[in-house]
Amino acid sequence: MQGKIALEEAFALPRFHEKTRWWASLFAVDPEKHAAEITDIADLRIKYMDKHGVGYTILSYTAPGVQDIWDPKEAHALAGEINDYIAEAIRPYPDRFGAFATLSMHEPHEAAAELKRCVSQLGFKGALVNDTQRAGPDGDDMIFYDDPSWDIFWSAVTELNVPFYLHPRNPTGSIHDKLWAKRKWLIGPPLSFAHGVSLHLLGMVTNGVFDRHPELQVIIGHLGEHLPFDVWRINHWFEDVKKPLGLSCKKTIREYFARNIYITTSGHFSTPTLEYCITELGPDRILFSIDYPFESFGDACDWFDGVRLKGANGTRWLYEWGVDMAKGDGVVLKKLINRDWRTGEPISVYDLDDYEERWGYVYYMFHRQYMHSMLKDCALQEEGEGKAAELKVNHQCEDIDLTTGTIRFKNGTRAEHDLIIGADGIGSAVRGIIGIRPAKRPADQSCLHANVSTEQAVKAGLVDYSIDSALEYWGGQEGKWDKIVLSPCNGGKLLSYYCFFPRSVGDYSSHAWAAEELPVEELLAPFPALDAQVLAHLSIGKEVKPENSLSQKAGELSFAETFIQMMPHQSQGACMAIEDAAALGILFSKPYFRGDIAEALAVYQDMRLPRVTRVQSAAAKAAYNINERIGFSANKDIATYKVEDEKNKLTIEEMNAYDMYKDVEERLAERRSQRFTAKYIHGLPLGLELPNGVVISINS
């Protein structure tokens, strides 16, 4: 992975080389190598960075640094020297290096002034401090920064809008003598580092630092210095015991982690640990770091680049619901392929071979009729918790009486309802009956759909696209509406083609799906310059019909309105429909539903609209530029790559890292004016068997 940013990376002043070498002899197998690496600024580092895909490094002075100097004047002078030195050393490399300020923490006004100088004059990115400041006549005192006297310093940090990195240092003085002297092998990363930083950070929480400075951002390393693994217990005792006894911090520990605290991967390269931290804290609160030169670029980067996280996609819910997916006769996708419009040569390929390993589930493609059938069978089966669904009628709706809750069908059947969940189209009769009439207009793009038999194509001597097990796209790179999308279905026996072109070439906005099939000549007409192989496939196409070519006016989404244009510009549209059902199922399940339908529906709308709108926006962009489609949006190295907003593009990682259970729990807690304590069901349900045979349990 290119472009990683590393932000806990140490350096030392060259004039302390001998002291650095002696210090390294206490923990390094090759102290000379360590001393050379930590005093080097650019030469070795840039070579390592280029080799391992690190684009930018933020440097900070090595521990214990200035925090080990108990004379205030000496500490202040050394901090200034260090900051001036590193500012000059990285000046020739503005695109590769930044720095955190080194601060003497004897006096808050002085620390604030030096931080302001470093940020405003030297361009530093924040500050890194090595835990408590040694103080007193013999250095046996410790200054913590959680007292109100330090508010002037924390105000400076927030006014400058920079982070504060709280880094560990070795225990000293009487603390060392009493706790660690006879347990020397536990000093440092094995235990003492986490012990010191976790005490200091929790002191900031309980003594109100984050309440007085709600915008403050603090970073701790080493995947949270053990704290994420004790969040439940800390939260339980803070909320259920300590606060009734007088603890006054305003938020829960989870809320402080969500709003004020980041953790990094520095020196902790464990995938199960990272997965746990993501579950507890969320991926947006975890940053990459190496801890060089105490750790190697190779160990950190090779691990991070190879991390495969378990996440959620549409397939997850099919497994959780117990859907018999054999009935769907799906295709497990192995690739996304974008081909040249004229030649058919691959332009951009996104490999899905490791999809299950990364996310816990395969990437399925189903034919819509088969998918509808297997979902219906699952809903109607007797197995499972609660009542089975009943198919009472299969007829067109004629009228709905919202006052009495009566639905009347054209065949004369009537039904009573408490809640109508509609999954029909943008112009459906049901929407109109209940008063949903969104402004709509013909889309800029028309689409014809056709099915091609793989067997017939092979008999005709044509390419067997089914062997690719891929979603395949022709065009879309040129910023035009012309695009062919191939979706393999029915175990590869059926090739489902969606053929897009400008509406000016053919307007089907007034056609209904139930209309008669169109002649194949009408399908071929818009594509005279198309790749000959795929054009030959289309020439034997059957069931040629227009797809929905209406657009809904932005901003007119109504309650529970999660309409997705179900075109495979963005196959996540189908996943969104499945997620809609999953969200309703969770919200109306026993652990969450309290009999308040309005509450459940309000939470449903709050959680679904932002996510669906995000996907729909990406789908609209992908209609005109295939690089906006998830998967292809990661292929930045191809010559034709271009997206509208690199920082805001949709990715597979964003889609699959989403935790719906956590989203539901947090929103319900907020609506019920409760603190989010994760006492609800959280994450994957116990007993769920993943496709790889792993069964979710408390231990897993």
Image (cartoon, helix red, strand yellow):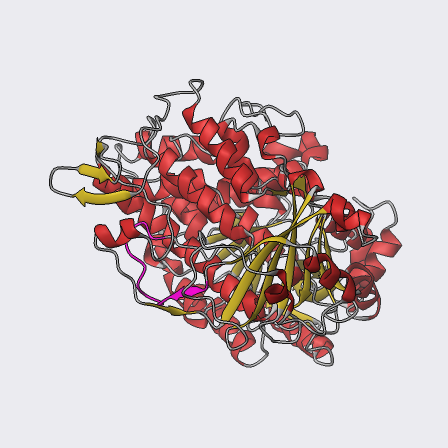
Q: Is residue 692 above or below residue 116?
A: above
Q: Which quarter of the image is occupied by the N terminus?
A: bottom right
Rendering coords of residue 155 (x, y %): 39, 66
Q: Is residue 351 left or right of residue 412?
A: right
Rendering coords of residue 513 (x, y %): 45, 54
Q: Residue furthest top?
A: 383
* Secondary structure character of the magenta stretch overall: loop
Q: Is residue 432 left or right of residue 483?
A: left
Q: Is residue 542 left or right of residue 560?
A: right
Q: Quadrant of residue 493?
A: top right
Q: Quadrant of residue 682?
A: top left
Residue 305 magenta-drawn?
Answer: no
Residue 558 magenta-drawn?
Answer: yes
Rendering coords of residue 578 (x, y %): 47, 42
The residue at 36%/42% (across/down) is: 666
The residue at 15%/43% (across/down) is: 402
Q: Which quarter of the image is occupied by the C terminus?
A: top right
- The answer to whether one can see residue 6 in this image is no
Q: Nearer the viewer, residue 21 or 659?
A: 659
Q: Is residue 657 above or below residue 322?
A: below
The residue at 55%/66% (across/down) is: 623
Q: Nearer the viewer, residue 50 or 565?
A: 565
Q: Is residue 389 above or below residue 293?
A: above
State which region is magenta.
Answer: 549-561
Rendering coords of residue 435 (x, y %): 21, 55
